[in-house]
Amino acid sequence: MSERTRYSDEELEEFRQIINEKIEKAQAEYDSLCRTLMNSEGNDVADTSPTFKVLEDGAYTLGREEAARLAERQRVFINKLRAALVRIDNKTYGICRATGKLIPKERLRIVPHATLSVEGKEMQK
């Protein structure tokens, strides 16, 4: 029996559903992080004593920086998932870009935006 070169349309639709669910969750988290970053009202340091103001300012800044990093990671993750949807449309989804072989379904279910199989990743090292 010859080795398969791509996933069937039914399998691609299964992956499309997985990816769309992940995009929905990631987008909700991204939106929440963006709201956190844009919160100009809320709890600030205007009503605290000068002694605690410096500590509060530092903690507030660190919290915003962390939220910004997390938001950027979510944005990148969403873009990778959307690129995976394009590969599904092109029927090239699940093909390792290093080996040309199919990436195992188990890997794609866990990391649906993967473009490399484990073997392909090891080849890059």
Image (cartoon, rainbow, N blue to C red):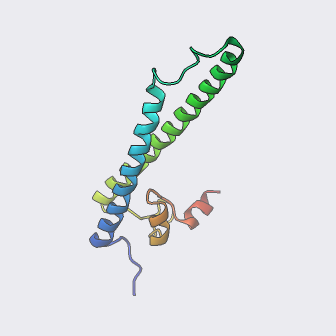
State left or right for residue 11 relative to residue 63: left
Query: Which image quarter: residue 79?
Result: top left
Question: In this rendering, does residue 63 appear at all?
Answer: yes
Relative image position of residue 99 (x, y in whole percent): 50, 65
- Residues 110 and 2: in front is 110
The residue at the point 72 percent across, 15 percent down is 51
Horizontal placement of 67 versus 94: left or right?
right
102 is higher (above) or lower (below) than 18: below
| Residue found at x 49% / y 64% | 110
- Which image quadrant is residue 39 in? top left
**From this viewpoint, is residue 79 visible?**
no
Q: Quadrant of the N terminus?
A: bottom left
Q: Measured along the vertical axis of the image, is residue 81 above or below residue 122?
A: above
| Residue at the limit of the structure toward the top, as seen here | 50
Q: Is 97 or 62 nearer to us in this picture?
A: 62
Residue 76: image location, x then y, percent: 46, 42
Q: Position of residue 74 (x, y in %)?
A: 47, 43
Residues 73 and 45: in front is 45
Instruction: Judge whether 92 appears above or below 38 on screen.
Output: below
Q: Is residue 49 left or right of residue 14?
A: right
The residue lying furthest to the bottom in this view is: 1
Q: Quadrant of the C terminus?
A: bottom right
Indicate the quadrant where residue 46 lies: top right
Residue 3 rendering spot, x and y as whole percentages: 41, 79
Which residue sits at x=48%, y=28%? 37
